[in-house]
Image (cartoon, rainbow, N blue to C red):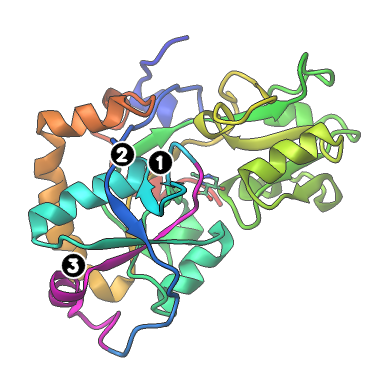
Amino acid sequence: MSTNISRRQLFQGALALGGVVAVGGSLTACSTTDPGGPEAGGGGGLLERAKTQGLRIAIGNEPPYTELAADGTVTGCEPDVVRAVCERMGIDKVEGIVSGYDAMIPGLKANRWDVIAAGLFMKQSRCREVIYASPVIVSTESFGVRPGNPKDIRTIADVKGRDDVRVGVVPGGFEQGILETAGIDAARIVNVTDARGGADALAADRIDAFLLPTLSLRELDGVEVTDPIEDAPSTGSSAAFRPDDQDFLDAYNTELEAFKTEPEFAEILNKWGFDPSVVAGVTTEELCAVDG
Ligand code: 6CS
């Protein structure tokens, strides 16, 4: 399976394999979701506060994008890149808070966390509410199906053309948007709790396919994973911030771009199963143009 795609293919929804990997970091999870004070978010000040109090990041606990270990350690692609960039910024404490994807942007606005570092894929509606750092992840979507793929589901068009196909998605996720944009009737779009919940729903025949990023599905036991879906839009992400924290984002991007040129970035990427060459040269503007 090719891992090389042209920019044209990438942004015309053609198939691409790969994305970005991050090494396991040593972030800790915290339970607090208390909104910070007025100084906590918005209107600047985040950089100085993060240097003294640390940075709170929202994660989805969906390996390999984000992972919360049993001992509370937070790792995965985005958190590990955030941790490495924060170290360069003089921020040595980063705490992860697990959230559903549908609550990540509202929680950011409510100062429950300072950054979304979950692989929250860029698209028009999200880019109107948050500001993204330079892309770190470019990845693909697949269907998780029962062994043998009994309903032969491989593309979004297959789902549209089969009224008997029920597709599981995580609430408020990028995949829900893909199906809604494709005009799939709401009755056939089934919310599942998370990646494990989708695998369980598939095994229990509550759904016929589970739409999720390719590499997330590959982490699930008992789920057959289709090749990346050729008619799904591109999925790319990076850390996401409140628009009022533009000064923090500018400082973050400066360090991120420098970090991307260092061997550690490529080392971080390959450990989790992604290819750093896929994200090279891709811009936030291009990914924020994705429909949805
Ligand atoms: O951006 C999103 O909403 C999607 N991102 C990931 C890493 N998994 C599922 C989720 O729907």
Can residue 182 be seen at all in this image of the molecule? no
Say which residue appears at 30% left-offset and 32% top-offset.
279
Q: Which mark is residue 56?
A: none
State left or right for residue 50 relative to residue 104.
left
The residue positioned 25% from the left and 51% from the top of the image is 82
Measure the alpha-carbon separation of dots 1 and 3.
21 Å
Numbered disc 3: secondary structure = helix
The reply, left or right, for residue 55 in relation to residue 218 is left
Position of residue 79 measured from the top left corner of the image (x, y, whole percent): 32, 49
In the image, is residue 279 part of the stretch drawn in magenta? no
Horizontal side, residue 264 vs residue 149: left or right: left
The alpha-carbon separation of the residues under discs 2 and 3 comes to: 24 Å
* Residue 217 lies in quadrant: top right
Q: Position of residue 29 (x, y in %)?
A: 38, 60
Q: CA distance from mark 1 to mark 2?
A: 20 Å
- Reading the image, the residue beneath label 1 is 236
Instruction: Judge whether residue 248 can be spotted in this image.
Output: yes
Q: In the rendered structure, which segment of residues is drawn in magenta?
A: 39-62
Count of picture labels: 3
Q: Secondary structure at mark 1?
A: strand
Residue corresponding to mark 3: 248
Q: Is residue 158 left or right of residue 177?
A: right
Q: Residue 89 sits in which quadrant? A: bottom left
Q: Are marks 1 and 2 in contact (CB under 8 Å)?
A: no
Dot 2: what SS? loop
> For the residue with label 1, is its CB less than 8 Å from the closest atom of ligand 1?
no
Above or below, 287 against 132 in this view is above
Specify the amino acid type for callout 3: Phe
Asked whether residue 58 is drawn in magenta, I would say yes
Judging by the rendered image, the residue that carries numbered circle 2 is 24
